[in-house]
Amino acid sequence: MQPQLPIDVNPETGVWTTDALPMLYVPRHFFTNNHTAVEEALGRDAYAGILYKAGYKSAYHWCAKEAEKHGIEGMAVFEHYLKRLSQRGWGIFTIVEADPASARARIELRNSSFVLAQPDKHGQDEKLCYMFAGWFAGAMDWVNDTSSDTTPDGKRAPRAQSREVRCACGGHAHCVFEVSPLTN
């Protein structure tokens, strides 16, 4: 993975862009402190639900913009998304397995920014990285919505859902996320 990102700073507005998308650059502790404060105020379940929906929408939008900018499609966009997340300091994301037609994927996350920024929570059976879950479902649905491929029975791929199934803060080597078909 090449760690350099193309960062352009508009000299008139001060707006930072990467791949033509406006960006913010903040210290990890600043983001994590805000994240945990909102979690405490709203409760984890309510906050996780809000983040899931917002993350899903943002990932879907990002995939559309990046596909157009770089002329890529399908799972190459999903892979590019994880590469960019990794380059931006969220952690190192790897697709272990993926089957878009069945809306399934398994993603590993090493060096999660949430785990690294909260050493006081290490050793607890807690999932700190739930914010990413909606991102993976949104990216998978974008892949399937823009693909002409269908499942073996001729139908479109099912909608995706995602969840963190293991967090490194619990003493595991890495976090694991599973993308699976949305059930009613």
Image: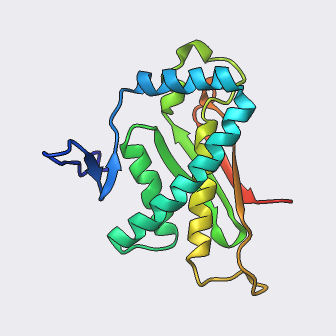
Residue 155 occupies which quadrant of the picture? Answer: bottom right
**Colour mode?**
rainbow
Report the side of 20 relative to 157 (left or right). left
Instruction: Place residue 174 in its image quadrant.
Output: top right
Above-or-below relation of 180 to 38: below
Q: Does the rendering let one see residue 107?
A: no
**Residue 3 at x, y = what percent?**
29, 45
Total labels: the figure holds: 0
**Which residue occupies the extreme bottom position in the image?**
154
Name above or below for residue 41 compared with residue 14: above
Q: Nearer the viewer, residue 60 or 124?
A: 60
In the rendered view of the protein, which quadrant contains the C terminus?
bottom right
Q: Is residue 94 or residue 55 the one in the foreground?
A: 55
Q: Is residue 133 left or right of residue 16?
A: right
Give the percent coordinates (x, y) of residue 9: 19, 46
Residue at the image position 61 percent from the left and 72 percent from the top: 144
Instruction: Measuring from the top left, give residue 143's x and y in whole percent.
Output: 56, 69
Spot occupied by residue 13 in the image (x, y as percentages of width and height): 20, 45
Q: Is residue 164 above or below residue 111?
A: below
Question: Which residue of the protein is positioned furthest toward the left in this rendering?
Answer: 11
Question: Which residue occupies 54% across, 61% down?
Answer: 60
Q: Is residue 48 visible?
A: yes
Name the residue at the top extreme.
120
Q: Residue at x 60, y 39 (%)?
A: 131
Front residue of 24/183: it is 24
Q: Residue furthest front?
A: 12
